[in-house]
Each structure stands twice: as structure tokens, then as C-alpha cells.
Image (cartoon, helix red, strand yellow):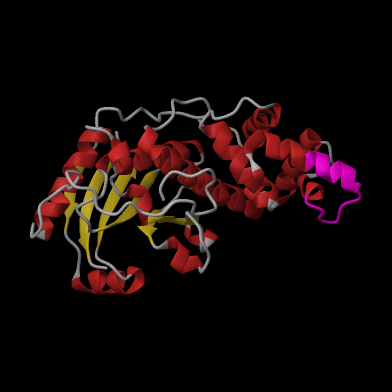
Amino acid sequence: MVIVMAEVSSSWRHGRHPGLVTTPSLGAVPGLQLWPPGTPTPVRVDVLAQRVGRLTEAMVTPVGDGVLHRVVRRANYAQDVLALSVQDASGRFRVLVPDRADISPGRLADAVRYLSSVRRRFPWAAVRSVSFDNASALTRTKVAGSVLEFKLLEIHVDRELIIASPDDGPGPEDIVDAAGMSGAEGPTAASSWLVQVLVHECWHLVESVFESTRYRDSLEFQKALGHALGVATLGHAYGAGSHATREEQGAALGRLREAVGDYATTTPREGTAELFTAWWLGMSGHPVVIAFGRLVDQFLPATP
């Protein structure tokens, strides 16, 4: 069971790829407001906590917060936020969302489910915090998600991804179970882009911890993935210290592009993150994606 505790704190929507903002916010949508204007903050917290708890079958308990925390969060995020402390099998992680009436509980529930599923599979690199904020301002680039400091195990995601829209449908009953690993049923249509961004960013954390704690194994992983692409190691596909010919590099990147899209060809880290996203969400049966999944199971097996 997932336990969610809501704290009161001050403090894109669908696209093709989790690295670029491709569509603007729709803003507030009439009829999709969680509470009417003027609703007191404690009531807003209760409403959001109850809705997310019901959608995830989680126990939800509002938790107060100190004045200092509220001041610091408002300074950090330039907005009022509601913080959800989520307890799952891997421990506790925090989800920060804007204090807005047009937050989608369904999308937030999908985020909680999928974050928990990745945390269960890789507990040694479990996300500690995800903040839905102005990720583009924090990174000074147009992004849907980012990891600013790997050691903190924190993810920042564009807040527009959890804003309600007509695509969210008439009710919350369509939320699916994200209990597993690769091949699990996908998220709701309205949350699919959000989930792709979250899973993509989770892999950045997993890969970072893998490289910092098992460096030699991570090199072997890179070599094996490179072989699946037709080069000696993954970095050679991108021209890093490569003895591969331009034709071999082009062919390797072509396989990546065919498997998961153009963004995977920008850097090795984005390539593996895109492969992980496609594998984890069962988005592609391409041989390169399948090979990647087998390597993850081989080098990073699930813990009992």
C-alpha cells in the first residue's frame, strides 16, 4: 500500500519527446476546478489528498508545516505549493505541486504510481523528491523535466504537466495499475506525456548511481549496449573517443533513432534514458529496446 501524507507549504502537456517543450499550457479549464475561489488552504489540502488517495487506494493524511518551511519553499519555487509525502515499499518521497485549483488529481495519481513502480525496481536509486515547478526557469533551457543535482535524487518537472485539461475525461476511474516493470499497462491518455517525462528522469538517477557505485560494471553495460548498436561501446555512436567510421556511427545512431526517436541521438545519457522509457512503459518492441531491457535485467537485477 502507498501512504500519502499531505503537507501545507508556501512557497506540457502532450508532446513527442521528454526533453523539449512542444505545446503551451492550456491554463485553467472551466468545470475542471478542484475547489471554488476563496477555499481555505486546509480544505484545499484535504480535497487534493482525498482525491489522490482515492485514485491510488492510498491512505492520505494532511500534515502541517512550519512557517520557516513555507517561507523557504515560497522563495525557492516562487509560488505557493502543496507537498505530498508519499510512503511506499522503498521508503518515503515527496511530491511538490502548485497550490492551484486546476491541478489534475488523476495525473498526479499516475505520477505517484509510476514513481513508486520505478522506486520498487531500483530502491538503491529511489527518487526522494519530485517538484512540479517551472523546470525551464530552473535550468534556463526549455525542458519538460530535469535533474539538477544527482546526489539529492530530486526531479523537477514542468508544472503544466499536471494541470487539468479536457483530455482528462469525465472522471478519475480510468487510472491504470502501474504495478510493474516493462510491459505494464500504460498510463491514462492525459497522463502519458507526464509519465514518459518522469520515467525518463528516473533513469538519469539510476544511471548516475550505477556509474558512481559500480563504475566498471557500468562500462561493461555501455560496451554491451554499443555492441547492440554495431559499435564497440555506446559512446562511440556519438563520436566520443571513437575508432568507428562515420558510416558506423551513423548506422548506430540510425538504429537508436529508429528505436526511440531523434532525441536519443543527442547524447549517450539521453539515449539510454529514452531506451529505458520505451522499455519500462512497453512503448516499443524494437530489437534495440529489447536488448537494452535484457542488459538492465542482467546488470541491474531486481532485488528480492
Give the side of residue 42 with respect to residue 139, left or right. Answer: left
Residue 213, image x, y percentages: 63, 52
Q: Residue at x 51, y 32 (%)?
A: 281
Residue 197, image x, y percentages: 48, 46
The picture quadrant where one finds residue 170 is top left
Residue 88 visible, this angle: no
Q: Residue at x 19, y 68 (%)?
A: 66
Give the side of residue 199 with respect to residue 99, left or right. Answer: right
Give the side of residue 114 with respect to residue 300, left or right. Answer: left
Residue 208 visible, this angle: yes
Give the side of residue 299 with respect to residue 243, left or right. Answer: left
Q: Nearer the viewer, residue 15 or 91?
A: 15
Image quarter hosting the N terminus: top left
Residue 58, image x, y percentages: 24, 36
Q: Nearer the viewer, residue 3 or 255?
A: 255
Residue 286, image x, y percentages: 66, 27
Q: Which residues are magenta?
A: 238-252
